[in-house]
């Protein structure tokens, strides 16, 4: 596995997922055969560590707002994406492009900006920042 991808996936799981689910995700996400089971659940994912969630303010669910916030917290120009969208999953993308594609598309997606420190989640029912 690409060490950069591993760093993002491991960082995301160990920092933002509840302990009881970490081991399972660590074994399934890097495996091509089992990855689909994990990413399929992202639309309604409920295993986040709630202490690491920062909700978006009302009316701030735009790609511009999310981009500005992530950049203010140290996000680089590129990010790593974990998504139920095959087009986006397991790829490094320009942050602004990734956000434009995922905001309000109702597909479960995690945008990992700084491994284990800063990410953005969007699903069908919820959207928020994940921060250490």
Image: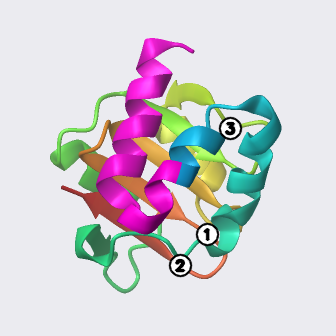
Look at mark 3 in the image and give the residue it sits on: 89
Q: Secondary structure at mark 3?
A: loop
Label whose residue precedes the other's in the sequence (2 or 3): 3
Query: Magenta segment range?
Result: 1-23
* Residue 86 in the image, given as x and y percentages of width and height: 80, 39
Residue 21 pos. (x, y %): 49, 62
**Contact? badges 2 and 1 (CB < 8 Å):** yes
Query: Which of pointers 3 and 1 lies earlier in the amino acid sequence?
Result: 3
Q: Is residue 17 magenta?
A: yes
Q: Can residue 67 be seen from the camera position used here?
A: no
Q: Position of residue 119 (x, y in %)?
A: 36, 50
Label disc, if present, on residue 123 of the rendered structure:
1
**Would you place residue 111 above or below residue 64 in this image?**
above
Q: Quadrant of the C terminus?
A: bottom left
Mark 3 closeness class: few <14, some 14–19, many ≥20 residues within 10 Å: some
Who's the residue at 39% across and 46% down the image?
12
Q: Mark 2 — residue?
A: 126
């Amino acid at each position: 596995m690409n060490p950069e991808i591993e760093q993002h996936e491991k960082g995301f799981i160990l920092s933002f997922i509840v302990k009881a689910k970490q081991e399972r995700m660590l074994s399934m996400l890097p495996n091509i055969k089992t990855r689909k089971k994990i990413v399929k659940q992202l639309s309604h994912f409920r295993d986040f560590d709630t202490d690491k969630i920062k909700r978006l303010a009302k009316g701030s669910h735009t790609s511009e707002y999310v981009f500005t916030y992530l950049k203010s917290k140290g996000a680089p120009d590129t990010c790593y994406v974990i998504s139920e969208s095959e087009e986006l999953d397991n790829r490094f993308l320009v942050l602004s492009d990734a956000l434009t594609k995922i905001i309000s598309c109702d597909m479960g997606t995690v945008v990992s900006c700084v491994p284990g420190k800063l990410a953005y989640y969007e699903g069908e029912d919820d959207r928020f920042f994940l921060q250490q």
